[in-house]
Amino acid sequence: MSGRALTRRELLAGAGAAAGGAVLLGSGVLGPARARAADGPPAWLEPEIRASRDGRLATRLRVAETEVTIARRPARAVVYEGTFPGPTLEVHAGDELAIDLVNDASQVTNLHTHGLHVSPRRPGDDVLLDVEPGASFGYRYAIPADHPGGTFWYHAHRHMLTDNQVFGGLFGMLIVRGALDRLPGIAGLEERALVMGQMEVVDGRVADADSSSLSNQVTLVNGRYQPALWMATGRTQRWRLVNTSSVFLRLRLDDHPLHVVAIDGNALPATRAHDVLELPPGGRADVLVQAARAGTFRLRSLSWEEYGVFYSSMVPVPQVLATLVVDGPPAEPAPLPTRLLAVDDLRRARVDRRRTFRLEEREPRGVGPLDAFEYYINGRMVDVSRVDEQIPLNATEEWVIRNLTYEPHPLHIHVNPFQVVAVNGDRRRGEDHYRDSALVPPYGSLTIRHRFLDFTGVFVMHCHILFHEDHGMMQILEVYGKDGPGPTRLPGGGHHGGGHHH
């Protein structure tokens, strides 16, 4: 190899990923000091919240290159509404969400509401839609009245551009208020958004993901590097954690368990305390944090080194993400909720059909052109004009995802959440809740069950290491109703235009 830094692609391919230096500050993110400023960590910054009223949230998301503040320094980035991350959108179950996406950038883009159980049909969560430069499109989402309350997010999802656009800043949090928010012990809690992502700035501009070296990136929280948040002694906060990056996080808060109440926007049946919480790319968690005593505590992402060499691409170097400062007179914390919401446990359900999917890849060792990286599901790279699997509405299916590669892959499925029922064939490792993103272990398997409810149409499943998705590890699924399945070739070559010019 030449003496240049490894690119993010090569590190994700395992070529020297043990460098894993997301703790390092590269290419001028914070300037030559490579450390926090002498006046301490940056103050906490919450993204702007745009909340629904009277059953509807109507808002605009303008995509444009803008100068934003990233880790205390100005940088040019393509973002939503001129902020990094974009504004937080907050709706209630049963609301209508109306988003006018205005594309004032130089590339085609679109929008995905990650984790929402909504229609994939236009004008809903159609990720095969193209919004061209200079055009706009009116997305309309009818949130079901029984939609889970929890933490979701939105981001660009234009195939072959997804990785660069999300890495570059096209993402934001999306909150649905529902039954979980009304439970005693959760209702009325002070909340904190923690939108976590990787970032590198080169010459005053956010780097392109394809050329960004992981060893030169930092992990930011709400666009800030190792910010500090405050809590009064004895108080409880609800933290909404979102991993927008393509790296795997193992979160630990010094001297404090993370009391998990929801994963990927889906409530657990009971509160569960974690000393370490794993958050795969695209994943989210709602956790309760209680400040039992005064002090300063670090939120860290731990090493994956103990899992062995096959996890070396997962940023094994520990790092600090944020600091929790607790002060004030001693106070007794309120009791935490124990029982949460009932879950329809699919481990006891009758299965209508079983399917198997194989994850495979071809990656050059060391330096190679981008088109030499190829990723497959069932021996095929994605073709956006081809429907790979067709599923009847209301079916309950069990899928085995076999990982034939040396690295973990975070599987994400649009529209319908799923339940993990076995890991490496071990049913004792099944889960009692739903999620939409899950880790498929290296040379292992994940067994999931899901019901395809409410919505027909075409959507996708893919690896949420977005470079893998862009380079083939995605399939197109169709859920069909009483009229039967449609053709396996989509009209118009898959991607189709939308919107109008302004």
Image: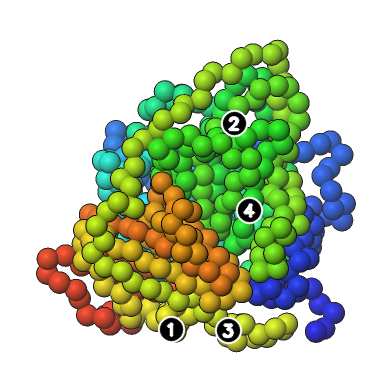
Q: Is residue 234 left or right of residue 318?
A: left
Disc 2 residue type?
Val
Where is 327 relative to 69, above or below? above
Q: Is residue 301 left or right of residue 352?
A: right
At 85% across and 53% down in the image, what residue appears? 34
Cα distance between the residues tagged 1 and 2:
44 Å
- Assign the C terminus to one quadrant of the image: bottom left
Question: Residue 412, which numbered label?
Answer: none
Disc 4 residue type?
Leu
Dot 4 or dot 3: first in sequence order is: 4
Cα distance between the residues tagged 2 and 3:
42 Å
Give the residue pinned by disc 3: 362
At 65% across and 57% down in the image, what residue appears? 198
Assign a secondary structure to mark 3. Answer: strand
Assign a secondary structure to mark 1. Answer: loop
Give the residue pinned by disc 2: 289
Question: Which residue of the protein is positioned furthest toward the left in this rendering?
Answer: 483
Assign a secondary structure to mark 4. Answer: strand
Q: State if disc 3 and disc 4 touch (CB < 8 Å).
A: no
Dot 4 or dot 1: first in sequence order is: 4
Residue 117: image x %, image y %?
Answer: 33, 52
Assign a secondary structure to mark 2. Answer: strand
Q: State if disc 1 and disc 4 touch (CB < 8 Å).
A: no
Residue 215: image x %, image y %?
Answer: 76, 64
At 44% across and 50% down in the image, what residue appears? 431
Cα distance between the residues tagged 3 and 1:
12 Å
Disc 3 residue type?
Arg
Dot 1 or dot 2: first in sequence order is: 2
Disc 1 residue type?
Arg
Please identify the quarter of the rendering in which residue 103 is found: bottom left
